[in-house]
Image (tube, rainbow, N blue to C red):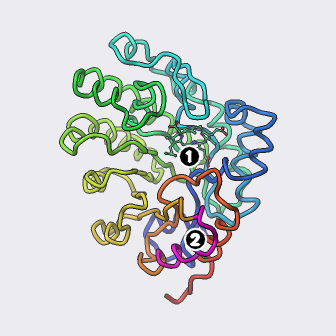
């Protein structure tokens, strides 16, 4: 029995599955302790340590999935990209012209983040079969945001300027990223990932028309290739209400939406597809009582069939652990006859 996979297939479940985006690092004291002696790069780049961090949240909370501890930037060294974390990604040589795009290598499958692939294998070997192991990558557009801008900045203006001024160059960049990410997710599936999540955190920056023209073909081709490996695909889209209908047409088994969306309405609009989300991560900062209430509201509002409980974006670093406990309790105590 694997609740997460049952929910993805739209089967009846004994209880809704629950995991939390960014559950592996950040708010856990034992993670902070490990960070005292190791950099993030060392932690995520060393399979022993990365597997240990991936498993930390499961030691405290009965989550239904473990997500491999890595970053969306982890596969990019294989393409020749140099970067550091401070604490978000900072790219040494941002890509803004044809020579930058030309320099990106097309890696062989076994060159793309072999340390992450090994971590997936170790995590799968360690957790019981009822816990799903999730692999992940960044969507081509979200990765391009960091590569072009050089770091996370509000609304990514240079990326949008490149899209307007050099659409073909952007297309070449997205095409290379899409190919590499398809290879990477397929390798994670072969190493034992039960499902893979594509994080499109900066999905909403362009209009629907520009998204259709410039971005969709690359995201769609990546998802199609990954689907050929037979692994379920979870597509996370943040802050892009105008694109939601378009995302629902993409080849993915699950659409994960942020807290601004009415997830029950999404569920009605896309019968046959699972949904994931979508409590506001800031609610957990408010403590256990608002967390319990938000969770109960969510469970009351969203059909159990095909619902994976999660937040609408990643867990915030200062989240009290009591709020996570309240979330778990509320999900676990839902009446099973409902
Ligand atoms: O100082 C530290 O400890 C490093 C902080 C950190 C961590 C814990 C970074 C740098 N990345 C991560 C891990 C990480 N990142 C995971 C592993 C699983 C987990 O923590 O449970 C995952 C899935 C990610 C994904 C990620 N990285 C996304 C997509 C999801 C999201 O939150 O939108 C994005 C956009 C990134 C970029 C990134 N890497 C790190 C930070 C702080 C950021 C975002 C901030 C920025 O844009 O500058």
In this view, the residue in front, 279 or 180, is: 279
The answer to whether 309 is drawn above or below residue 68 in the figure is below
Q: Which residues are magenta?
A: 284-298
Please identify the quadrant where the N terminus is shown.
bottom right
x and y percentages locating residue 152 in the rendered image: 47, 33
Mark 1 or mark 2: which is in front? Answer: 2
288 in the magenta segment: yes
Dot 2 falls on a residue whose secondary structure is helix
Q: Residue at x 46, y 63 (%)?
A: 278
Residue 215, by quadrant, is top left
Kindly tell me whether mark 1's CB lies below 8 Å from ligand 1. Answer: no
The answer to whether 106 is drawn above or below residue 294 in the figure is above
Q: Which mark is residue 135?
A: 1
Dot 1 falls on a residue whose secondary structure is strand
The answer to whether 207 is drawn above or below residue 100 in the figure is below
Q: Residues within 10 Å of mark 1 (few under 14, many from 20)?
A: many
x and y percentages locating residue 40 in the rendered image: 68, 34
Mark found first going from the N terminus, 1 or 2 = 1
x and y percentages locating residue 208 in the rendered image: 21, 45
């Amino acid at each position: 029995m694997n609740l997460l996979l049952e929910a993805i297939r739209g089967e009846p479940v004994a209880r809704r599955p629950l995991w939390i985006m960014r559950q592996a690092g950040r708010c856990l004291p034992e993670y902070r302790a490990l960070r005292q002696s190791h950099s993030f790069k060392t932690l995520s780049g060393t399979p022993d340590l990365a597997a240990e961090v991936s498993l930390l949240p499961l030691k405290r909370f009965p989550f239904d999935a473990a997500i491999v501890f890595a970053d969306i930037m982890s596969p990019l060294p294989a393409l020749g990209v140099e970067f550091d974390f401070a604490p978000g990604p900072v790219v040494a040589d941002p890509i803004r012209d044809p020579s930058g795009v030309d320099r990106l290598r097309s890696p062989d499958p076994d060159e793309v983040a072999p340390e992450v692939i090994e971590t997936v294998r170790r995590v799968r070997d360690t957790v019981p079969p009822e816990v799903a192991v999730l692999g992940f990558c960044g969507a081509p557009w979200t990765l391009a945001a960091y590569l072009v801008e050089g770091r996370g900045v509000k609304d990514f203006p240079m990326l949008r300027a490149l899209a307007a001024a050099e659409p073909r160059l952007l297309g070449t960049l997205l095409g290379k990223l899409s190919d590499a990410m398809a290879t990477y997710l397929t390798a994670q599936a072969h190493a034992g990932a039960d499902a893979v999540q594509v994080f499109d955190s900066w999905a909403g920056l362009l209009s629907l028309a520009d998204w259709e023209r410039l971005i969709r073909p690359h995201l769609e081709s990546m998802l199609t290739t990954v689907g050929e490996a037979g692994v379920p695909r979870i597509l996370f889209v943040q802050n892009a209400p105008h694109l939601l209908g378009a995302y629902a047409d993409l080849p993915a088994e699950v659409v994960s939406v942020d807290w601004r969306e009415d997830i029950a309405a999404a569920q009605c609009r896309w019968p046959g597809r699972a949904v994931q989300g979508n409590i506001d991560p800031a609610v957990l900062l408010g403590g256990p009582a608002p967390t319990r209430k938000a969770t109960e509201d969510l469970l009351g509002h969203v059909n159990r069939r095909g619902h994976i409980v999660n937040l609408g974006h990643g867990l915030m670093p200062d989240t009290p652990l009591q709020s996570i406990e309240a979330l778990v309790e509320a999900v676990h105590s839902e009446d099973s006859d409902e």
